[in-house]
Amino acid sequence: MKDAIVRLLSPFGNFMYTVTAAIPMWAVRVLVFAVLAALAIWVLRMRPQTPDGEDKAGKMDLRWFALLVLVLQAILYIIF
């Protein structure tokens, strides 16, 4: 049974490998950074967010923490 499933899915697996191997790495990097940049712009355009129970006049705006996380993700992607 296992061999039949492998024979059935092998052409699809080979096709998917060929398609993904044809995509240049620079295009993948551009796409990832574009998604992270779009998320950062979207987060900054949102209205200021504060944790529940905290005064609105407080200085803790969660948007900046979200932006920090996106920047850290971009840095980790560059390194690794």
Image: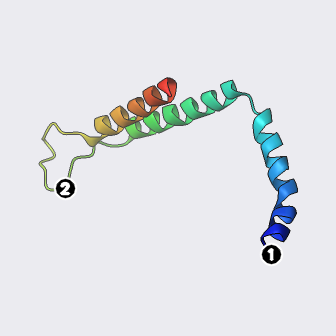
Mark 2, secondary structure of its residue: loop
Residue that numbered label 1 is attached to? 1
- Quarter of the picture containing the N terminus is bottom right
The relative height of residue 74 versus residue 46 in the rendered view (above or below) is: above
The residue shown at (82%, 67%) is: 3
Quadrant of the image occupied by residue 8: bottom right
Q: CA distance from mark 1 to mark 2?
A: 55 Å
Residue furthest to the bottom in view is 1
The relative height of residue 14 versus residue 59 in the rendered view (above or below) is: below
74 vs 5, nearest the viewer: 5
Q: Estimate the x, y position of residue 61 in percent, counting from the top left.
A: 23, 39
Quadrant of the image occupied by residue 34: top right
Residue that numbered label 2 is attached to? 52
Q: Estimate the x, y position of residue 71 in percent, counting from the top left.
A: 40, 29
Quadrant of the image occupied by residue 22: top right
Task: Look at label 1 and name its amino acid.
Answer: Met
Q: Residues within 10 Å of mark 2 (few under 14, many from 20)?
A: few
Q: Residues within 10 Å of mark 1 (few under 14, many from 20)?
A: few
Q: Estimate the x, y position of residue 27 in percent, counting from the top left.
A: 69, 28
The relative height of residue 26 versus residue 56 in the rendered view (above or below) is: above
The residue shown at (80%, 52%) is: 13
User: Are discs 1 and 2 less than 8 Å apart at CB?
Assistant: no
Residue 11 is tagged as: none
The relative height of residue 51 versus residue 28 in the rendered view (above or below) is: below
Q: Earlier in the sequence, mark 1 or mark 2?
A: 1
Q: Estimate the x, y position of residue 76 in percent, counting from the top left.
A: 44, 29
The residue shown at (13%, 41%) is: 57
60 vs 75, nearest the viewer: 75
Mark 1, secondary structure of its residue: loop
Task: Look at label 2 and name its amino acid.
Answer: Asp
The residue shown at (84%, 48%) is: 14
